[in-house]
Image (spheres, rainbow, N blue to C red):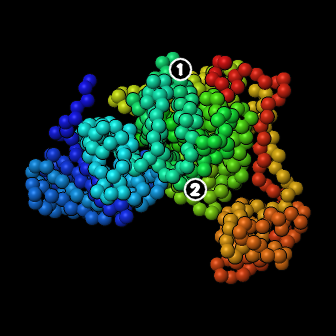
């Protein structure tokens, strides 16, 4: 069908223009052709899907006014993120300014170098008319610094040309806010994965970026994931995909969308011309590829396969679900695993990454107090609001969720002799709940349906795993589960190394305890998180970098040392009995001659 460049007369009409680059202000308007007769209500989302915390984006609206037929219209604020206009006939337009100075993947950012926004930060929702078509005209800033800027978004063009300023269209409000926009002088490259165009957009200075290697690696990852969910058709659930990356000095994060992802990374993590052209990626680049793999997997798992409470989202309040272990944890399992299947890394590197994950889960005592189901439910108040005591109080549904996925996979493969695996369950979730979601036939999945589907598809009774490891807090018996597949998992922690068992951070006076682990030497002696250690047995502790480990290396486990520390502005002394290092040192390795079919590095039934 030929693309139309004509506006849709009944559509909600938006315009957004960078007004003041140095002042970080966007000018936004929204025009409603037929406002509600009793007074149209507008609301800005309080949170963004994929980041489960109330962020109150409306606080960034600097000023706002309404007009109709050239005359001012009264606008009353109803609550912290909602306004109601007085009743009017004919089109109603709101004009407002949005302050954009949040350099993250979650909100909006604008300066002389680029502009970025998520719709949840800038587009007021027209309450009651969310199902209408929505159009947005993205305007070029008047500032001469932006004369060469382009636009990157997965939103469909209406009057705009690809990568150009102009008019774009979305089928409804949910789609509108699911297409972030990047504008600026970005590096751009494209590739096709099973016939689908994919764009790579890199904003920020990255000297000698090896875009060719990045294209090749992302192509391999994307094709592997498309084939994972659609092994017969190799059909992706989208017409185009965009990787938007902001490269900075130090940063890491990503947020998934239905046809794109917003990423932030350290520029040192991106591949460099002159570096290795083949072989496994270095640590930083591998970290970035793992992030890309994670967010791309969300194209299926959470953007289309959704928990029932996300279908649809209520963006004004918390949406509670105990299923984030499935949507984030299982995605965290497959992000690295599919790097192996894509040929990006080998099995030894994968085992090193997995060992770090196992160690991080075993490190904190919070795992014995909070289940991943509860962690999922409490993400709004606990996981996304972590403090110095979090390792002692909570468990990550990302990391333990990924190990639960591993446990399910190993259990199913062993009990079915490699004929079934977790792959089959993920594809069944896709076929039943995700494939037709945006076609109108899809719906969210409930906790009860998830559990029943696992048993049905695997042919294995898995309720015990749900009871012990998802609703319960037991540690996963991974060494036992791995043994039938010929993989040895051992904990080689250095128990002879004396330790305070606390997180050590920098401070001008000495070493700040960022965390104090429950039951450790520091805790037993009475030290607390945020205390600043300045001396151990009368010897000064340096803060840049901290030399705590060097000072403790002259002692043995069981020795008593005197630690002087500031708590607030009070100097205190503590008698500490040194314990052995309790940091897990997990290693995984194949056992010669014991390896069997069904390894998780390959699809099931191989």
Q: Which of 143 and 116 is in front in this view?
A: 143
Picture quadrant of residue 564 = bottom right
- Quadrant containing the N terminus is top left
Q: Nearer the viewer, residue 390 or 499?
A: 499
Q: Residue 405 at what x, y percent from top left?
A: 62, 35
Q: Can residue 82 be seen in this view?
A: no
Of label 2 and label 1, which has the lower sequence position? 1
Would you place residue 398 above or below residue 85 in this image?
above
The residue lying furthest to the bottom in this view is 570
Question: At 75% across and 26% down in the image, what residue appears?
Answer: 485
Give the numbered dot on residue 231.
Answer: 1
Q: How many other residues sit within 10 Å of disc 1, few (<14), some (14-19) or many (≥20)? A: few
Give the numbered dot on residue 281.
Answer: none
Q: Residue 211 at what x, y percent from top left?
A: 54, 39
The answer to whether the residues at label 2 and label 1 have Cβ atoms under 8 Å apart is: no
Q: How many other residues sit within 10 Å of disc 2, few (<14), some (14-19) or many (≥20)? A: few
Would you place residue 521 above or below residue 443 in this image?
below
Q: Name the residue carrying label 2.
A: 250
Picture quadrant of residue 99 = bottom left
User: How far apart, in angstroms, are the residues tagged by discs 2 and 1?
Assistant: 38 Å
Q: Can residue 500 be seen in this view?
A: yes
Q: Residue 369 at what x, y percent from top left?
A: 65, 52
26 left or right, relative to 310: left
Question: At 67% across and 42% down in the image, what residue appears?
Answer: 282
Question: At 83% across and 46% down in the image, what residue appears?
Answer: 492
Q: Name the element at disc 2.
A: loop
Q: Name the element at disc 1.
A: loop
Q: Residue 51 at what x, y percent from top left?
A: 47, 49
Would you place residue 447 above or below residue 538 in this image?
above
């Amino acid at each position: 069908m030929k693309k139309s460049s004509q506006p849709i007369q009944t559509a909600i009409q938006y315009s957004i223009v960078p007004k003041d680059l140095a002042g970080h202000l966007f000018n936004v308007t929204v025009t409603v052709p037929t406002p509600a007769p009793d007074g149209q209500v507008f609301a800005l989302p309080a949170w963004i899907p994929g980041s489960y915390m109330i962020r109150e984006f409306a606080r960034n609206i600097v000023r706002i006014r309404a007009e109709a037929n050239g005359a001012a219209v009264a606008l009353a604020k109803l609550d912290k993120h909602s306004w109601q206009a007085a009743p009017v006939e004919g089109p109603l337009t709101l004009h407002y300014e949005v302050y954009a100075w949040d350099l993250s993947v979650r909100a909006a950012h604008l300066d002389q170098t680029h502009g970025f926004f998520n719709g949840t930060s800038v587009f007021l929702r027209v309450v009651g008319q969310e199902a209408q078509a929505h159009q947005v005209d993205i305007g070029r800033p008047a500032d001469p610094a932006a004369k060469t800027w382009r636009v990157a978004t997965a939103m469909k063009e209406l009057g705009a040309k690809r990568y150009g300023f102009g008019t774009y269209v979305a089928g409804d409000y949910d789609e509108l806010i699911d297409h972030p926009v990047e504008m600026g002088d970005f590096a751009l490259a494209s590739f096709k994965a099973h016939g689908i165009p994919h764009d790579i957009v890199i904003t920020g200075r990255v000297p000698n970026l090896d875009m060719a290697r990045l294209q090749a690696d992302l192509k391999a990852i994307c094709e592997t994931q498309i084939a994972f969910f659609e092994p017969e058709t190799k059909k992706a659930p989208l017409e185009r995909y965009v990787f938007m990356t902001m490269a900075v000095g130090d940063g890491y994060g990503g947020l998934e969308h239905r046809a794109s992802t917003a990423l932030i990374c350290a520029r040192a993590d991106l591949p460099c011309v002159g570096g290795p052209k083949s072989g496994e990626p270095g640590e930083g680049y591998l970290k970035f590829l793992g992030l890309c793999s994670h967010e791309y997997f969300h194209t299926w798992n959470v953007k289309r396969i959704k928990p029932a409470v996300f279908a649809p989202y209520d963006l004004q309040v918390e949406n509670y679900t105990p299923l984030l272990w499935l949507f984030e944890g299982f995605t965290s399992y497959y992000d690295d695993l599919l790097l192996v299947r894509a040929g990006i890394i080998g099995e030894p590197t994968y085992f090193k990454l997995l060992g770090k994950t196992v160690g991080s889960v075993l490190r904190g005592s919070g795992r014995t107090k909070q289940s991943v189901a509860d962690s999922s439910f409490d993400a709004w108040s606990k996981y996304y609001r972590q403090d110095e005591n979090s390792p002692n109080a909570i468990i990550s549904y990302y990391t333990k969720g990924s190990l639960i996925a591993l446990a399910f996979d190993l259990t199913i493969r062993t009990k079915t002799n490699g004929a079934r695996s977790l792959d089959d369950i993920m594809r069944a979730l896709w076929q039943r709940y995700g494939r037709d979601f945006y076609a109108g036939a899809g719906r969210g999945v409930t906790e009860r349906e998830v559990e029943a589907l696992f048993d049905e598809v695997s042919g294995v009774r898995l309720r015990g795993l749900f009871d012990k490891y998802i609703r319960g807090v037991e540690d996963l018996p991974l060494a036992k589960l791995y043994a039938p597949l010929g993989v040895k998992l051992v904990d080689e922690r250095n128990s002879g190394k004396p330790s305070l068992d606390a997180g050590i951070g920098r401070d001008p006076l000495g070493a700040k305890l960022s965390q104090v682990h429950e039951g450790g030497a520091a805790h037993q002696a009475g030290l607390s998180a945020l205390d600043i250690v300045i001396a151990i047995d009368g010897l000064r502790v340096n803060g840049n970098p901290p030399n705590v480990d060097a000072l403790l290396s002259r002692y043995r486990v069981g020795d008593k040392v005197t630690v002087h520390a500031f708590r607030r502005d009070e100097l205190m002394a503590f008698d500490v009995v040194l314990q052995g290092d309790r940091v897990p040192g997990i290693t995984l390795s194949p056992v010669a001659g014991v390896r069997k079919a069904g390894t998780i590095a390959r699809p099931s039934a191989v």
